[in-house]
Amino acid sequence: MKLIKQLLFVLVLIIMLYGCKNKDNAMTSTPTSTEATSEDRTGQAFIQDDESTPNCLQIAIGSPDHKTLVAAVQAAQVENALVNVGPLTVFAPTDDAFAALPEGTVEHLMQPEQKEALANILKYHVTPGNLSTTILTKLPKLGQANNQYVQVEVIDGKPVIGGANIIASVPAGNGIVHVIDKVLLPPTE
């Protein structure tokens, strides 16, 4: 009986080794598609998925009122930050909120040499956690993804984030998106 168990163990080991060998060979075979260029963007932000609940980035992309925000996220190349982690609370300024900034501000920030400053501003719109408006009314301030804080006030029973009103809230696959009427600007040092 002991001999049979040993033979079965050896047989299972041989099958496993053979299976791993074939898997390695399959992984080293030449790809059938064309190779990706260095300009291709990679990461979860660029994976197509039509079946799950949209993530924070997909919600912004699908919104007709967030074209400037999406362009800014792409210019700063922070797309993966909005899909790789979670849960997140994203405060998404509308196009009208960006238009209310001083003339030329958005165009200036979209320049390649302003990528770091733009990324800092965008990260100031993201808080770790899935924070509903009810939870937000109980917090005096929020720690943002750029390592700064934004103040929360409660006016007429509704949270006001850094002076921005929440117009709508949309649940996301990796958190929640709160549509706001003002661009949040981090405090300067």
Image (cartoon, helix red, strand yellow):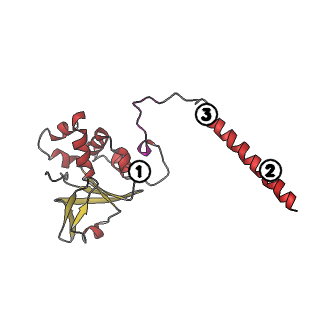
Could you tell me residue 66's position as x and y percent?
A: 28, 47
- Which residue range is magenta in the image? 36-45
Mark 3 or mark 2: name the one nearer the start of the chain: 2
What type is the residue that disc 2 sits on? Leu
Could you tell me residue 42's position as x and y percent?
A: 43, 39
Circles 1 and 3 in contact, beta carbons < 8 Å? no
Circle 2 — which element? Answer: helix
In the image, taking residue 25 as reference, residue 98 lies left or right, namely left
What type is the residue that disc 1 sits on? Asn
Could you tell me residue 178's position as x and y percent?
A: 29, 58
Residue indicated by mark 1: 84
Location of residue 157 with respect to 111 vertically, above or below: below
Q: Could you classify mark 1 by the number of other residues whose Cα lies within 10 Å: few (under 14), some (14-19), or many (20 or more)?
A: few
- Indicate which label's residue lies in the foreground, 1 or 3: 3
For marks 1 and 3, give the CA distance.
28 Å
- Indicate which label's residue lies in the foreground, 2 or 1: 2
Mark 2 or mark 1: name the one nearer the start of the chain: 2
Number of numbered discs present?
3
Circles 3 and 2 in contact, beta carbons < 8 Å? no
Q: Residue furthest left?
A: 102
Q: Nearer the viewer, residue 178 or 8?
A: 8
Circle 3 — which element? Answer: helix
- Asked if the stretch drawn in magenta spans residue 139, the answer is no
In the image, taking residue 67 as reference, residue 42 lies left or right, namely right
